[in-house]
Amino acid sequence: MPILSFKDGKDIEVPSGKRLVLAIQDAGIDILHRCGGHAKCTTCRVTVLRGEPARMTQAEYERLEARGLLGEFRLSCQMLCEQDMTLVVANTVANSDVEDSGPRPAPEITPTPVWIDAPTKAAPSADG
Ligand code: FES
């Protein structure tokens, strides 16, 4: 079963194939999912420090691109636990002004996933 590691040093073992946002929340880790997991709000976004999946849903791509977040974040509601990952959760009830995390996402990815290759991250500039 995949291991999810978090910045605070917490490691959790999660069922293979589980929707990432639910795996995080069900482990007792604070994470927002304000649109209920429909790739609309981006509050479920995470930084993937290690083990980033090579594919993403078309819905995730379009939402991240529209918000200028592509290449920086991934949407945990659009991801499955298929490998070990090290993650940083961006938005929590504790660090925001909302009263709850949002409606619980369905067990399966919504909308029905259309998988595409995730864009590769830009290499650091040589003159940067
Ligand atoms: S984009 Fe809203 S919960 Fe993922």
Image: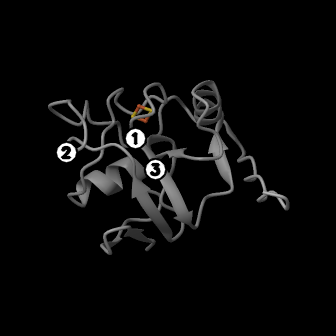
- Mark earlier in primary sequence (1, 2): 1
Task: Residue under label 3, please give it.
Answer: 46
Task: List x then y, in percent, for residue 79.
Answer: 51, 49
Q: Please state which amino acid type lies under the numbered disc 1.
A: Cys
Please name the residue shown 63% across and 45% down the image: 56
Task: Residue under label 2, please give it.
Answer: 94
Mark 3 secondary-structure assignment? strand
Q: Ligand 1 falls in which quarter?
A: top left
Q: Please state which amino acid type lies under the numbered disc 2.
A: Ala
Relative placement, left or right, of 45 versus 127 is left
Q: CA distance from mark 1 to mark 2?
A: 14 Å
Mark 1 secondary-structure assignment? loop
Instruction: Give residue 14's quadrant in the image.
Output: bottom left
Q: Is mark 1 within 8 Å of ligand 1?
A: yes
Contact between labelled residues 2 and 1, with CB atoms less than 8 Å apart: no
Q: CA distance from mark 3 to mark 2?
A: 16 Å
Please name the residue shown 45% across and 71% down the image: 2
Numbered label attached to residue 44? 1
Task: List x then y, in percent, for residue 1.
Answer: 43, 74
Task: List x then y, in percent, for residue 63.
Answer: 58, 28
Q: How many marks?
A: 3
